[in-house]
Amino acid sequence: MQLTPITPVHYPTLVGDRKIIVGNGNGPALYNQTTGDVLSVQHYNIDAPLGGSESLSGNYAVVPRPIGIGNAQGWTLDWFALPGWTRVAPNTNLSAEQVQLAVIAGT
């Protein structure tokens, strides 16, 4: 998922030498349970997402998972169907689903 910052006027917000970016994005056209939905923000390395989110429709939730441990390893989102928190099946089209997330990131 490519996050698009909400408004450049408000975000990113500086916190020391890092930035808090609040943005939104759409799910993948074909969900992959192994790789998840790789999270990115153009021009930034994500240190950590600030929690998960429920999709705008309320049908799904996303939970961030680190791709690796260490500096600039990256993050992915695991998608779950609501209610019940059932993991989304492989190849599910989630492109119409929108979520809003906050991340701590740097360049």
Image (spheres, rainbow, N blue to C red):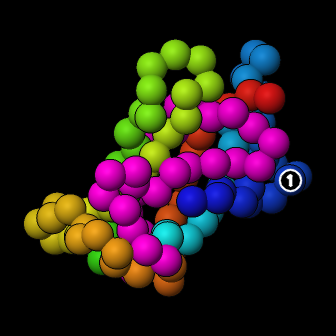
Which image quadrant: the C terminus? top right
Locate residue 64, reporting x and y percent: 40, 44
Locate residue 29, reporting x and y percent: 49, 77
Q: Residue 30: in sight, yes or no? A: yes
Q: Residue 61: in sight, yes or no? A: no
Magenta stretch, overall SS: loop
Please give left or right for residue 89 compared with residue 54 in the image: left
Which image quadrant: the N terminus? bottom right
Residue drawn at point x = 55 percent, y = 49 percent: 39
Residue drawn at point x = 75 percent, y = 38 percent: 44
Which is more toward the observer, 65 or 61?
65
Is 36 one of the magenta-colored residues?
Answer: yes
27 vs 65: above or below: below
Residue tagged 1:
8
Residue drawn at point x = 60 percent, y = 66 percent: 25
Instruction: Report the magenta residues as a range.
Output: 29-58
Please give left or right for residue 70 compared with residue 13 in the image: left
Which is more toward the observer, 45 or 49?
45
Locate residue 75, reporting x and y percent: 50, 39
